[in-house]
Structure formats: structure tokens, C-alpha cells
Amino acid sequence: MARLFVLEHRYFQFIAKFINGKYIPGLYLHTFSLSNRNLIEKFSESLSCKNLIKLSSQDISELYYLNLNSESDCKFQTSIIFDELNSITQFDQVKKIFLSLNTDDVLIGRYSLDNNDFFRKTLDEYFQRFSSGITFEGYGIWWVKRKNINISFIIPAFNADKTLAQSIDSIIDGNIEVNDEIIVVNDSSSDNTNIILKKYSENFSYIKYITHQNNLGGGAARNTAVENSKNDLIFCLDSDNILLKGSIKKLKEFMLADTWSVCAFGQLEYFYDFPNAVTHRWIFRDGQVNLEDCFASHIIPPSSGNYLYTKKSWIISGGYPENSGALDAWGFGLAQLVSGNKMGVLPGLSYLHRYGHESYWVRESTANEISTKALELIRPYLSKFEKHSINYLSKKKYQDNWFENIDIKPLKLIDEPYGLGGRVVDISGKYINQKSFIRKIRVWLKSFRIL
């Protein structure tokens, strides 16, 4: 009790110091337990303020507003949590409070010193994903300033004049919010891509494009887009794929409700000519994607690369590899997982994935080259693999095809189970054998001289 009393005293001191000299019109006071009402009354008395108004809330046990009678034109409020954070349930309430704040509002709280490491780590993991970050003041006291959490949509484009407009329109139509932006990098196209981009940038202030004077590849184009982005969240959409209306909002909500740094749609709906004529689906496994999954299946989010992630995860992982051809997305997803970024899948939500034309993957990939480049991408992490997997990769006869056969012959990480992937189903929902499906697609593409 003495420790708690000292903490309350220091907590009140910190809040008083925080608001002193700041023209704050009022404070929102939160408590998750009715037993802490007296703390709110005690705190208001300490500020010699009697303008305490009880508010009602569906999600919070008690919510009060303390009017400080500020005559300034300050636009931000401060929210204060009076409970010690000592349960995941309370942490869920903290997230709801944070997400309900307006831009520049401040949230102040404290965590239980009895579980110092756990709750400090939990808070840090949630808030440090964004530019607002979190500040720890000692004695369990922390505060965070609410900033806009918006999305920069990035599109790498090379000779994409036949599909690019459809991709951009799918963002504009029901997936973009105020303060979001669209950045397209024209990777030295020789068709009408630049003309299309010029027209869009003239008509929409939130669309900008950057042109590479030389063709640098998909990885470099994606990195250029992220480098020139302004927002905390990035969604990478390939120039031939299409978003479904309203899907990004749900994906963003999924990310903000947890500590994900990367969030992917649960399904890819494949089409050839017409978006409403889906031929088959990739369905990812629900929940968290782990590093070992990259070495057991192709049916994982890194294989697609069309997903939502934090800009900080891009920084931590070192960005997209720029010498890996069509494996830049897979290599980036791999680096995100190696760097400790938490990747999650939202089941039931999808985007439309075009195939069969001369896409980036088709242009850049050949059987032998893909496995060779994939081996170069995992070479820095070979110490993480079991000895028998390293021996397998060291044999020349497997080095040219190990990546294509990863679902048949998965690699094994030390002290980890074999990874898991998703599944391929036809339009009726019938399971398709992944190996035979890939073989059929290759035969079909070769018949059109695409491969």
C-alpha cells in the first residue's frame, strides 16, 4: 500500500507537471474499476478544480471529464488512466482509448511495477510501431501522443499501361481516407505508363509519381516509393492487381487491434481476363505467420507481397532486396520475419490477383534462376537451419530446384517445427494439389510462349 501511495503521489506530480504551462482545455479521466473513483476525486481536488463531469461510456467502467476552463484555442485534450495496467483485458481497453483520441491528443497511464518487464514490453510493442512512439517516465508512468495513422499506397510500375488504371481506381474507389496517399514509381517504362500517371496526378492531389531514368527492378521501385512516403503504414499493391471496395479499412482495423507490424488478406482471388471471373484462390493459414513457414510453402503472404505493413518494419528489415528479381517481395517478407516483425493474416478478406499475362513474376522468373536467387537471400540465415537442411542445400543437384520443391521438401529451422502454409482451391472450393497445379500453370504459360 505504501508503494502504491508513493506511485499515486508521483503520478499526480507528473500529470500536474505535464499540464503546467500547456493550454489544455480539459482532461478525460478513465478508470476500469469502480474502486478507483476516489482517486479521480482526489486528483481533481489536487488541481483545485471542481468542474468534474461524469460521462457515460460503453467500453469503459467510469469516464469523467475535468474542465480546466482554459481560454486558449488549444485543439488537443489529455486522457489519463487511473488504473495500474496489470492485465491484458485492461490493455485492450487502453488500445480502445488510444484509437478513440483525436490527432495530437495525449494519453497518460501507468503499468504495474509487479509486472514491470511484461507490461512495459507490451506497451512498447504496440506503440513503437508508429511515429508517435511512447515515452516512459519511470515508476511505471508512460505517455503517448496520438498522431495520424494513415496509409501510403505504393505501386511499382513497368510497362503497365494496360492494367495500372484499374489498380489505382481500386484504391480510389472505397479504400482511401483523408491524409492517405498513393505513390507510383514508373520504373523506366517504354509504353504509356507515364501518360496515365501524369493524368492521375493532375486530377488527384494525393497521387504522385516518380520516374526512374533506368529500369532498376521491382525491389528498387518499391524502396523508392517507401522512401518518399509520409505515412506510418504502407500498402504495396502491384500494378496489375485489384483491391476490393472497403477491404483496406478492415485490414487496418485488424492491425491496430493487435501488435501486428504486417497484416495480409486471408485470400488471393486469381483471375485471368476479367476480375469477376475468378478461376482459383490461394487461402492462407489463419493467425500468425512464422519464419519457418517461408521454408515449407509458397502459399504464404511473403509470396504475394501485396499487404499492409508499418514503415518501421521496412526500416528494421532493411527494405526490399534489389538484386533478387521477382523474389524481392518474398525476400522482403523473409527479412521482416527475421527482424522480429509480427505478421498476421485476416481470414475471409481478399484481393484480386491477375495472372497469365506478362507480369513482373513471369518476366523475371525462370526455374533455375529462382532457386539460385532464393538461396542467395537465405544465405545470411543458414546458421538458423538444421544440419540436414544445410546438407540438402549444399548439393548441386538441389540448388537449382529446391525453392520450387519447397512444399515437397521443406527446410527445417533449429528448435522449430516444420512450417505451415495455406492451400489452393478452385472456384467451387475444391482443394487443388499445389504441385500439380503449379505444373499445369507452367505448361499453360509455355503454350503461350510466356515462359
Image (spheres, grey):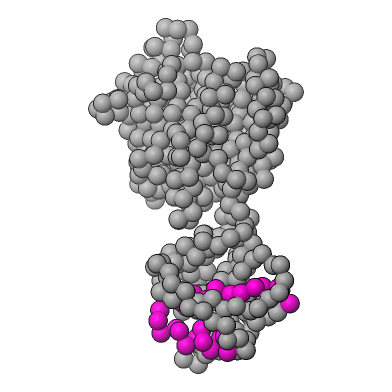
Measuring from the top left, give residue 283's x and y in whole percent.
35, 35
Measuring from the top left, give residue 176's x and y in whole percent.
55, 40
Q: Which residues are magenta?
A: 21-45
Q: Nearer the viewer, residue 248 or 127?
A: 248
Measuring from the top left, give residue 124's x and y in whole percent.
55, 63
Q: Taking 439 as reference, is 317 left or right?
A: right
Measuring from the top left, give residue 71's x and y in whole percent.
71, 74
Residue at screen point 43% across, 16% down: 273
Q: What is the count of numbered marks?
A: 0
Residue sitting farthest toward the bottom: 2
Q: Nearer the viewer, residue 99 or 416?
A: 99
Vertical arrangement, residue 17 with respect to residue 270, above or below: below
* Residue 30 belongs to magenta span: yes
Q: Quadrant of residue 153?
A: top right
* Residue 102 belongs to magenta span: no
Residue at screen point 35% across, 40% down: 348
Residue at screen point 64% across, 31% down: 184
Residue at screen point 54% across, 29% down: 169
Vertical arrangement, residue 143 with respect to residue 410, above or below: below
Residue 377 in view, yes or no: no
Q: Taking 311 as reference, is 290 left or right?
A: left
